[in-house]
Image: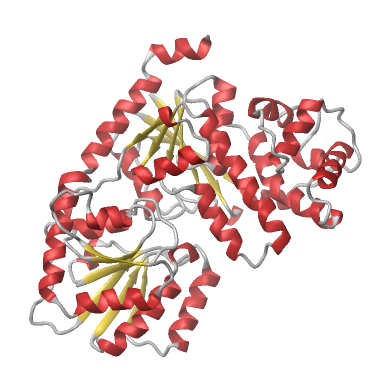
Amino acid sequence: MKICMIAEGSYPYITGGVSSWIHNIVSQMPEHEFIIYSIGAQSKQAGKFKYELPANIIEVKETFLDTYLEEEGKWGSRFRLSSLNKQNIQSLLGSGEDIHWNNLFKVLRSEKFKNAADFLSSKDFFDILEELCSKKYNLIPFTEMFWTVRSMILPLFLTIRNDIPEADVYHSVSTGYAGVVGALAKFLYTKPLLLTEHGIYSREREEEIIKADWVKGYFKDVWIEYFYKLSSCAYEEADEVVTLFNRNKEIQVELGCNSNKIRIIPNGVHSTEYTNIGVVNPEDNIIRIGAIVRVVPIKDIKTMLQSFALIKREIPQAEFTIMGPYEEDEQYYEECLQLVETLALKDVTFTGSVRVKDYLGRMDLLMLTSISEGQPLAILEGMAGSKPFVSTNVGSCKELLDGLDDGIGPAGLIAPVMHYEQIAIAAIQLCKNRALREEMGRNAFLRVQKYYRQSDVIKNYRALYQSLGGDSKWRELASN
């Protein structure tokens, strides 16, 4: 079977998290051929893969959202769009009506115009936006609205006009652009679409936009609604939707996904691979705190550093090691280094990309201070290494650490998002109590070993691929 896996902002350019999940799926299913359709942010990433690709990846199709900067359109053309075409464009921009995505795909892939910029420079688009502004955005200066909306949707339109490799099954690993590409592939080839959502994409984009300096206040709602519209495309067109835990399923249903499509397949790890990673020396007085994390804003490294400043006052022998890549957002990484300097912090190390198992055994406890998560592999890896956690209460972190009445006991402590004082208090409690750390570490390993096995993940996805791409019943339904 040939499976096209569609990823945005992850594999194969970034390590950890969703990228690790994709790599594990592909590596452990050698019986299938995989095409990776990778949507990157910047063209400079082209070909710069962070993984040695398995032999069963037969193609990597790269597309980059910043290519819109190179595209110029011919101003003032008119393409005689139908009323439905106009309604679809307005719906995409927030008019409130449902989007007929297949119709939108036909229009945007039409040979009527040479490129996407031609359409966005046309009299048709100008008229559509002018009408929408008069109805909904009449207080926003039209010129600003025009250029903001144009830059907002041009990457999407370019992506829709790109070629998509043919496959037996399309598997989008998020909603957003990846979900739209999956829906487009289903439309073009009449093949099934599987969606796996690790975090809730639209909620994560909303959090980023609210905090973003580059979006003016009165445009924030426009951007946020736009990303919710993109997510609705994937929910509507997917034949099966996989989520990682029940709360995510509830949110997906709230956002319009049919609950009958959704199944829960938790993440997993090979816990046996972590049994010989070494142990903490009981004679060593140093308290080593670690974080398995990408250095990006959504992981809120700054709160982590502020927490460690308080920990260091109470536990002067504490050391902090941040294990993960920092090249993804170089400006944010520099801001983190400046914060270390401002706080006069000692014993803080950013390792960059490393083999986590080489460090994990030496850690006394681990931290995660994200402002949004799904079901983080970082926590599962730490739990497999028998390490207790202090984590913010996001995604399924509380469920992972406390369990669902499984009788095992807590594997860490939970604190509120961005509350560095409470995070520090929880970490200090563990720093001062070796017996509690060891007890929670044992609980962590037991829970992972029982409920979060990578072998179960592969078994479930192997069956799911077979039901979609190998079952003639789906083809019969699709043709009717």
Residue drawn at x 52%, y 36% is: 256
- Whether residue 142 sits left or right of residue 222 in the image: it is right
* Quarter of the rendering containing residue 135: top right
Query: Seen in the image, is 441 located left or right of residue 474?
Result: left
Q: In which quarter of the image is residue 58?
A: top left
Write down the quadrant of residue 112 in the picture: top right
Q: Tally the numbered discs.
A: 0
The residue located at (90%, 36%) in the rendering is 77
The image shows residue 240 at horizontal and vertical percentages of: 42, 29
Rendering coords of residue 214 (x, y %): 67, 65
- Inspect this view and state whether residue 457 appears: yes
Residue located farthest toward the left when viewing the structure as drawn: 283
Q: Is residue 27 above or below residue 363?
A: above
Residue 37 can be seen, yes or no: no
Choose between 383 and 131: the one closer to the eye: 131
Q: In front: 137, or 311?
A: 137
Which residue is drawn at the image coordinates 34% and 51% (left, top)? 375
Q: Is residue 112 left or right of residue 335?
A: right
Q: Residue furthest right?
A: 76
Residue 316, given in percent of the width and then of the height, sits at 26, 89
* Left or right: residue 229 compared with residue 6: right
Name the residue: 31% across, 43% down: 24
In the image, 117 versus 403, the foreground residue is: 403
Colour pattern of the rendering:
secondary structure
- The answer to which of 238 and 408 lies nearer the viewer is 408
Q: Position of residue 294 (x, y in %)?
A: 41, 63
Picture quarter with the N terminus: top left
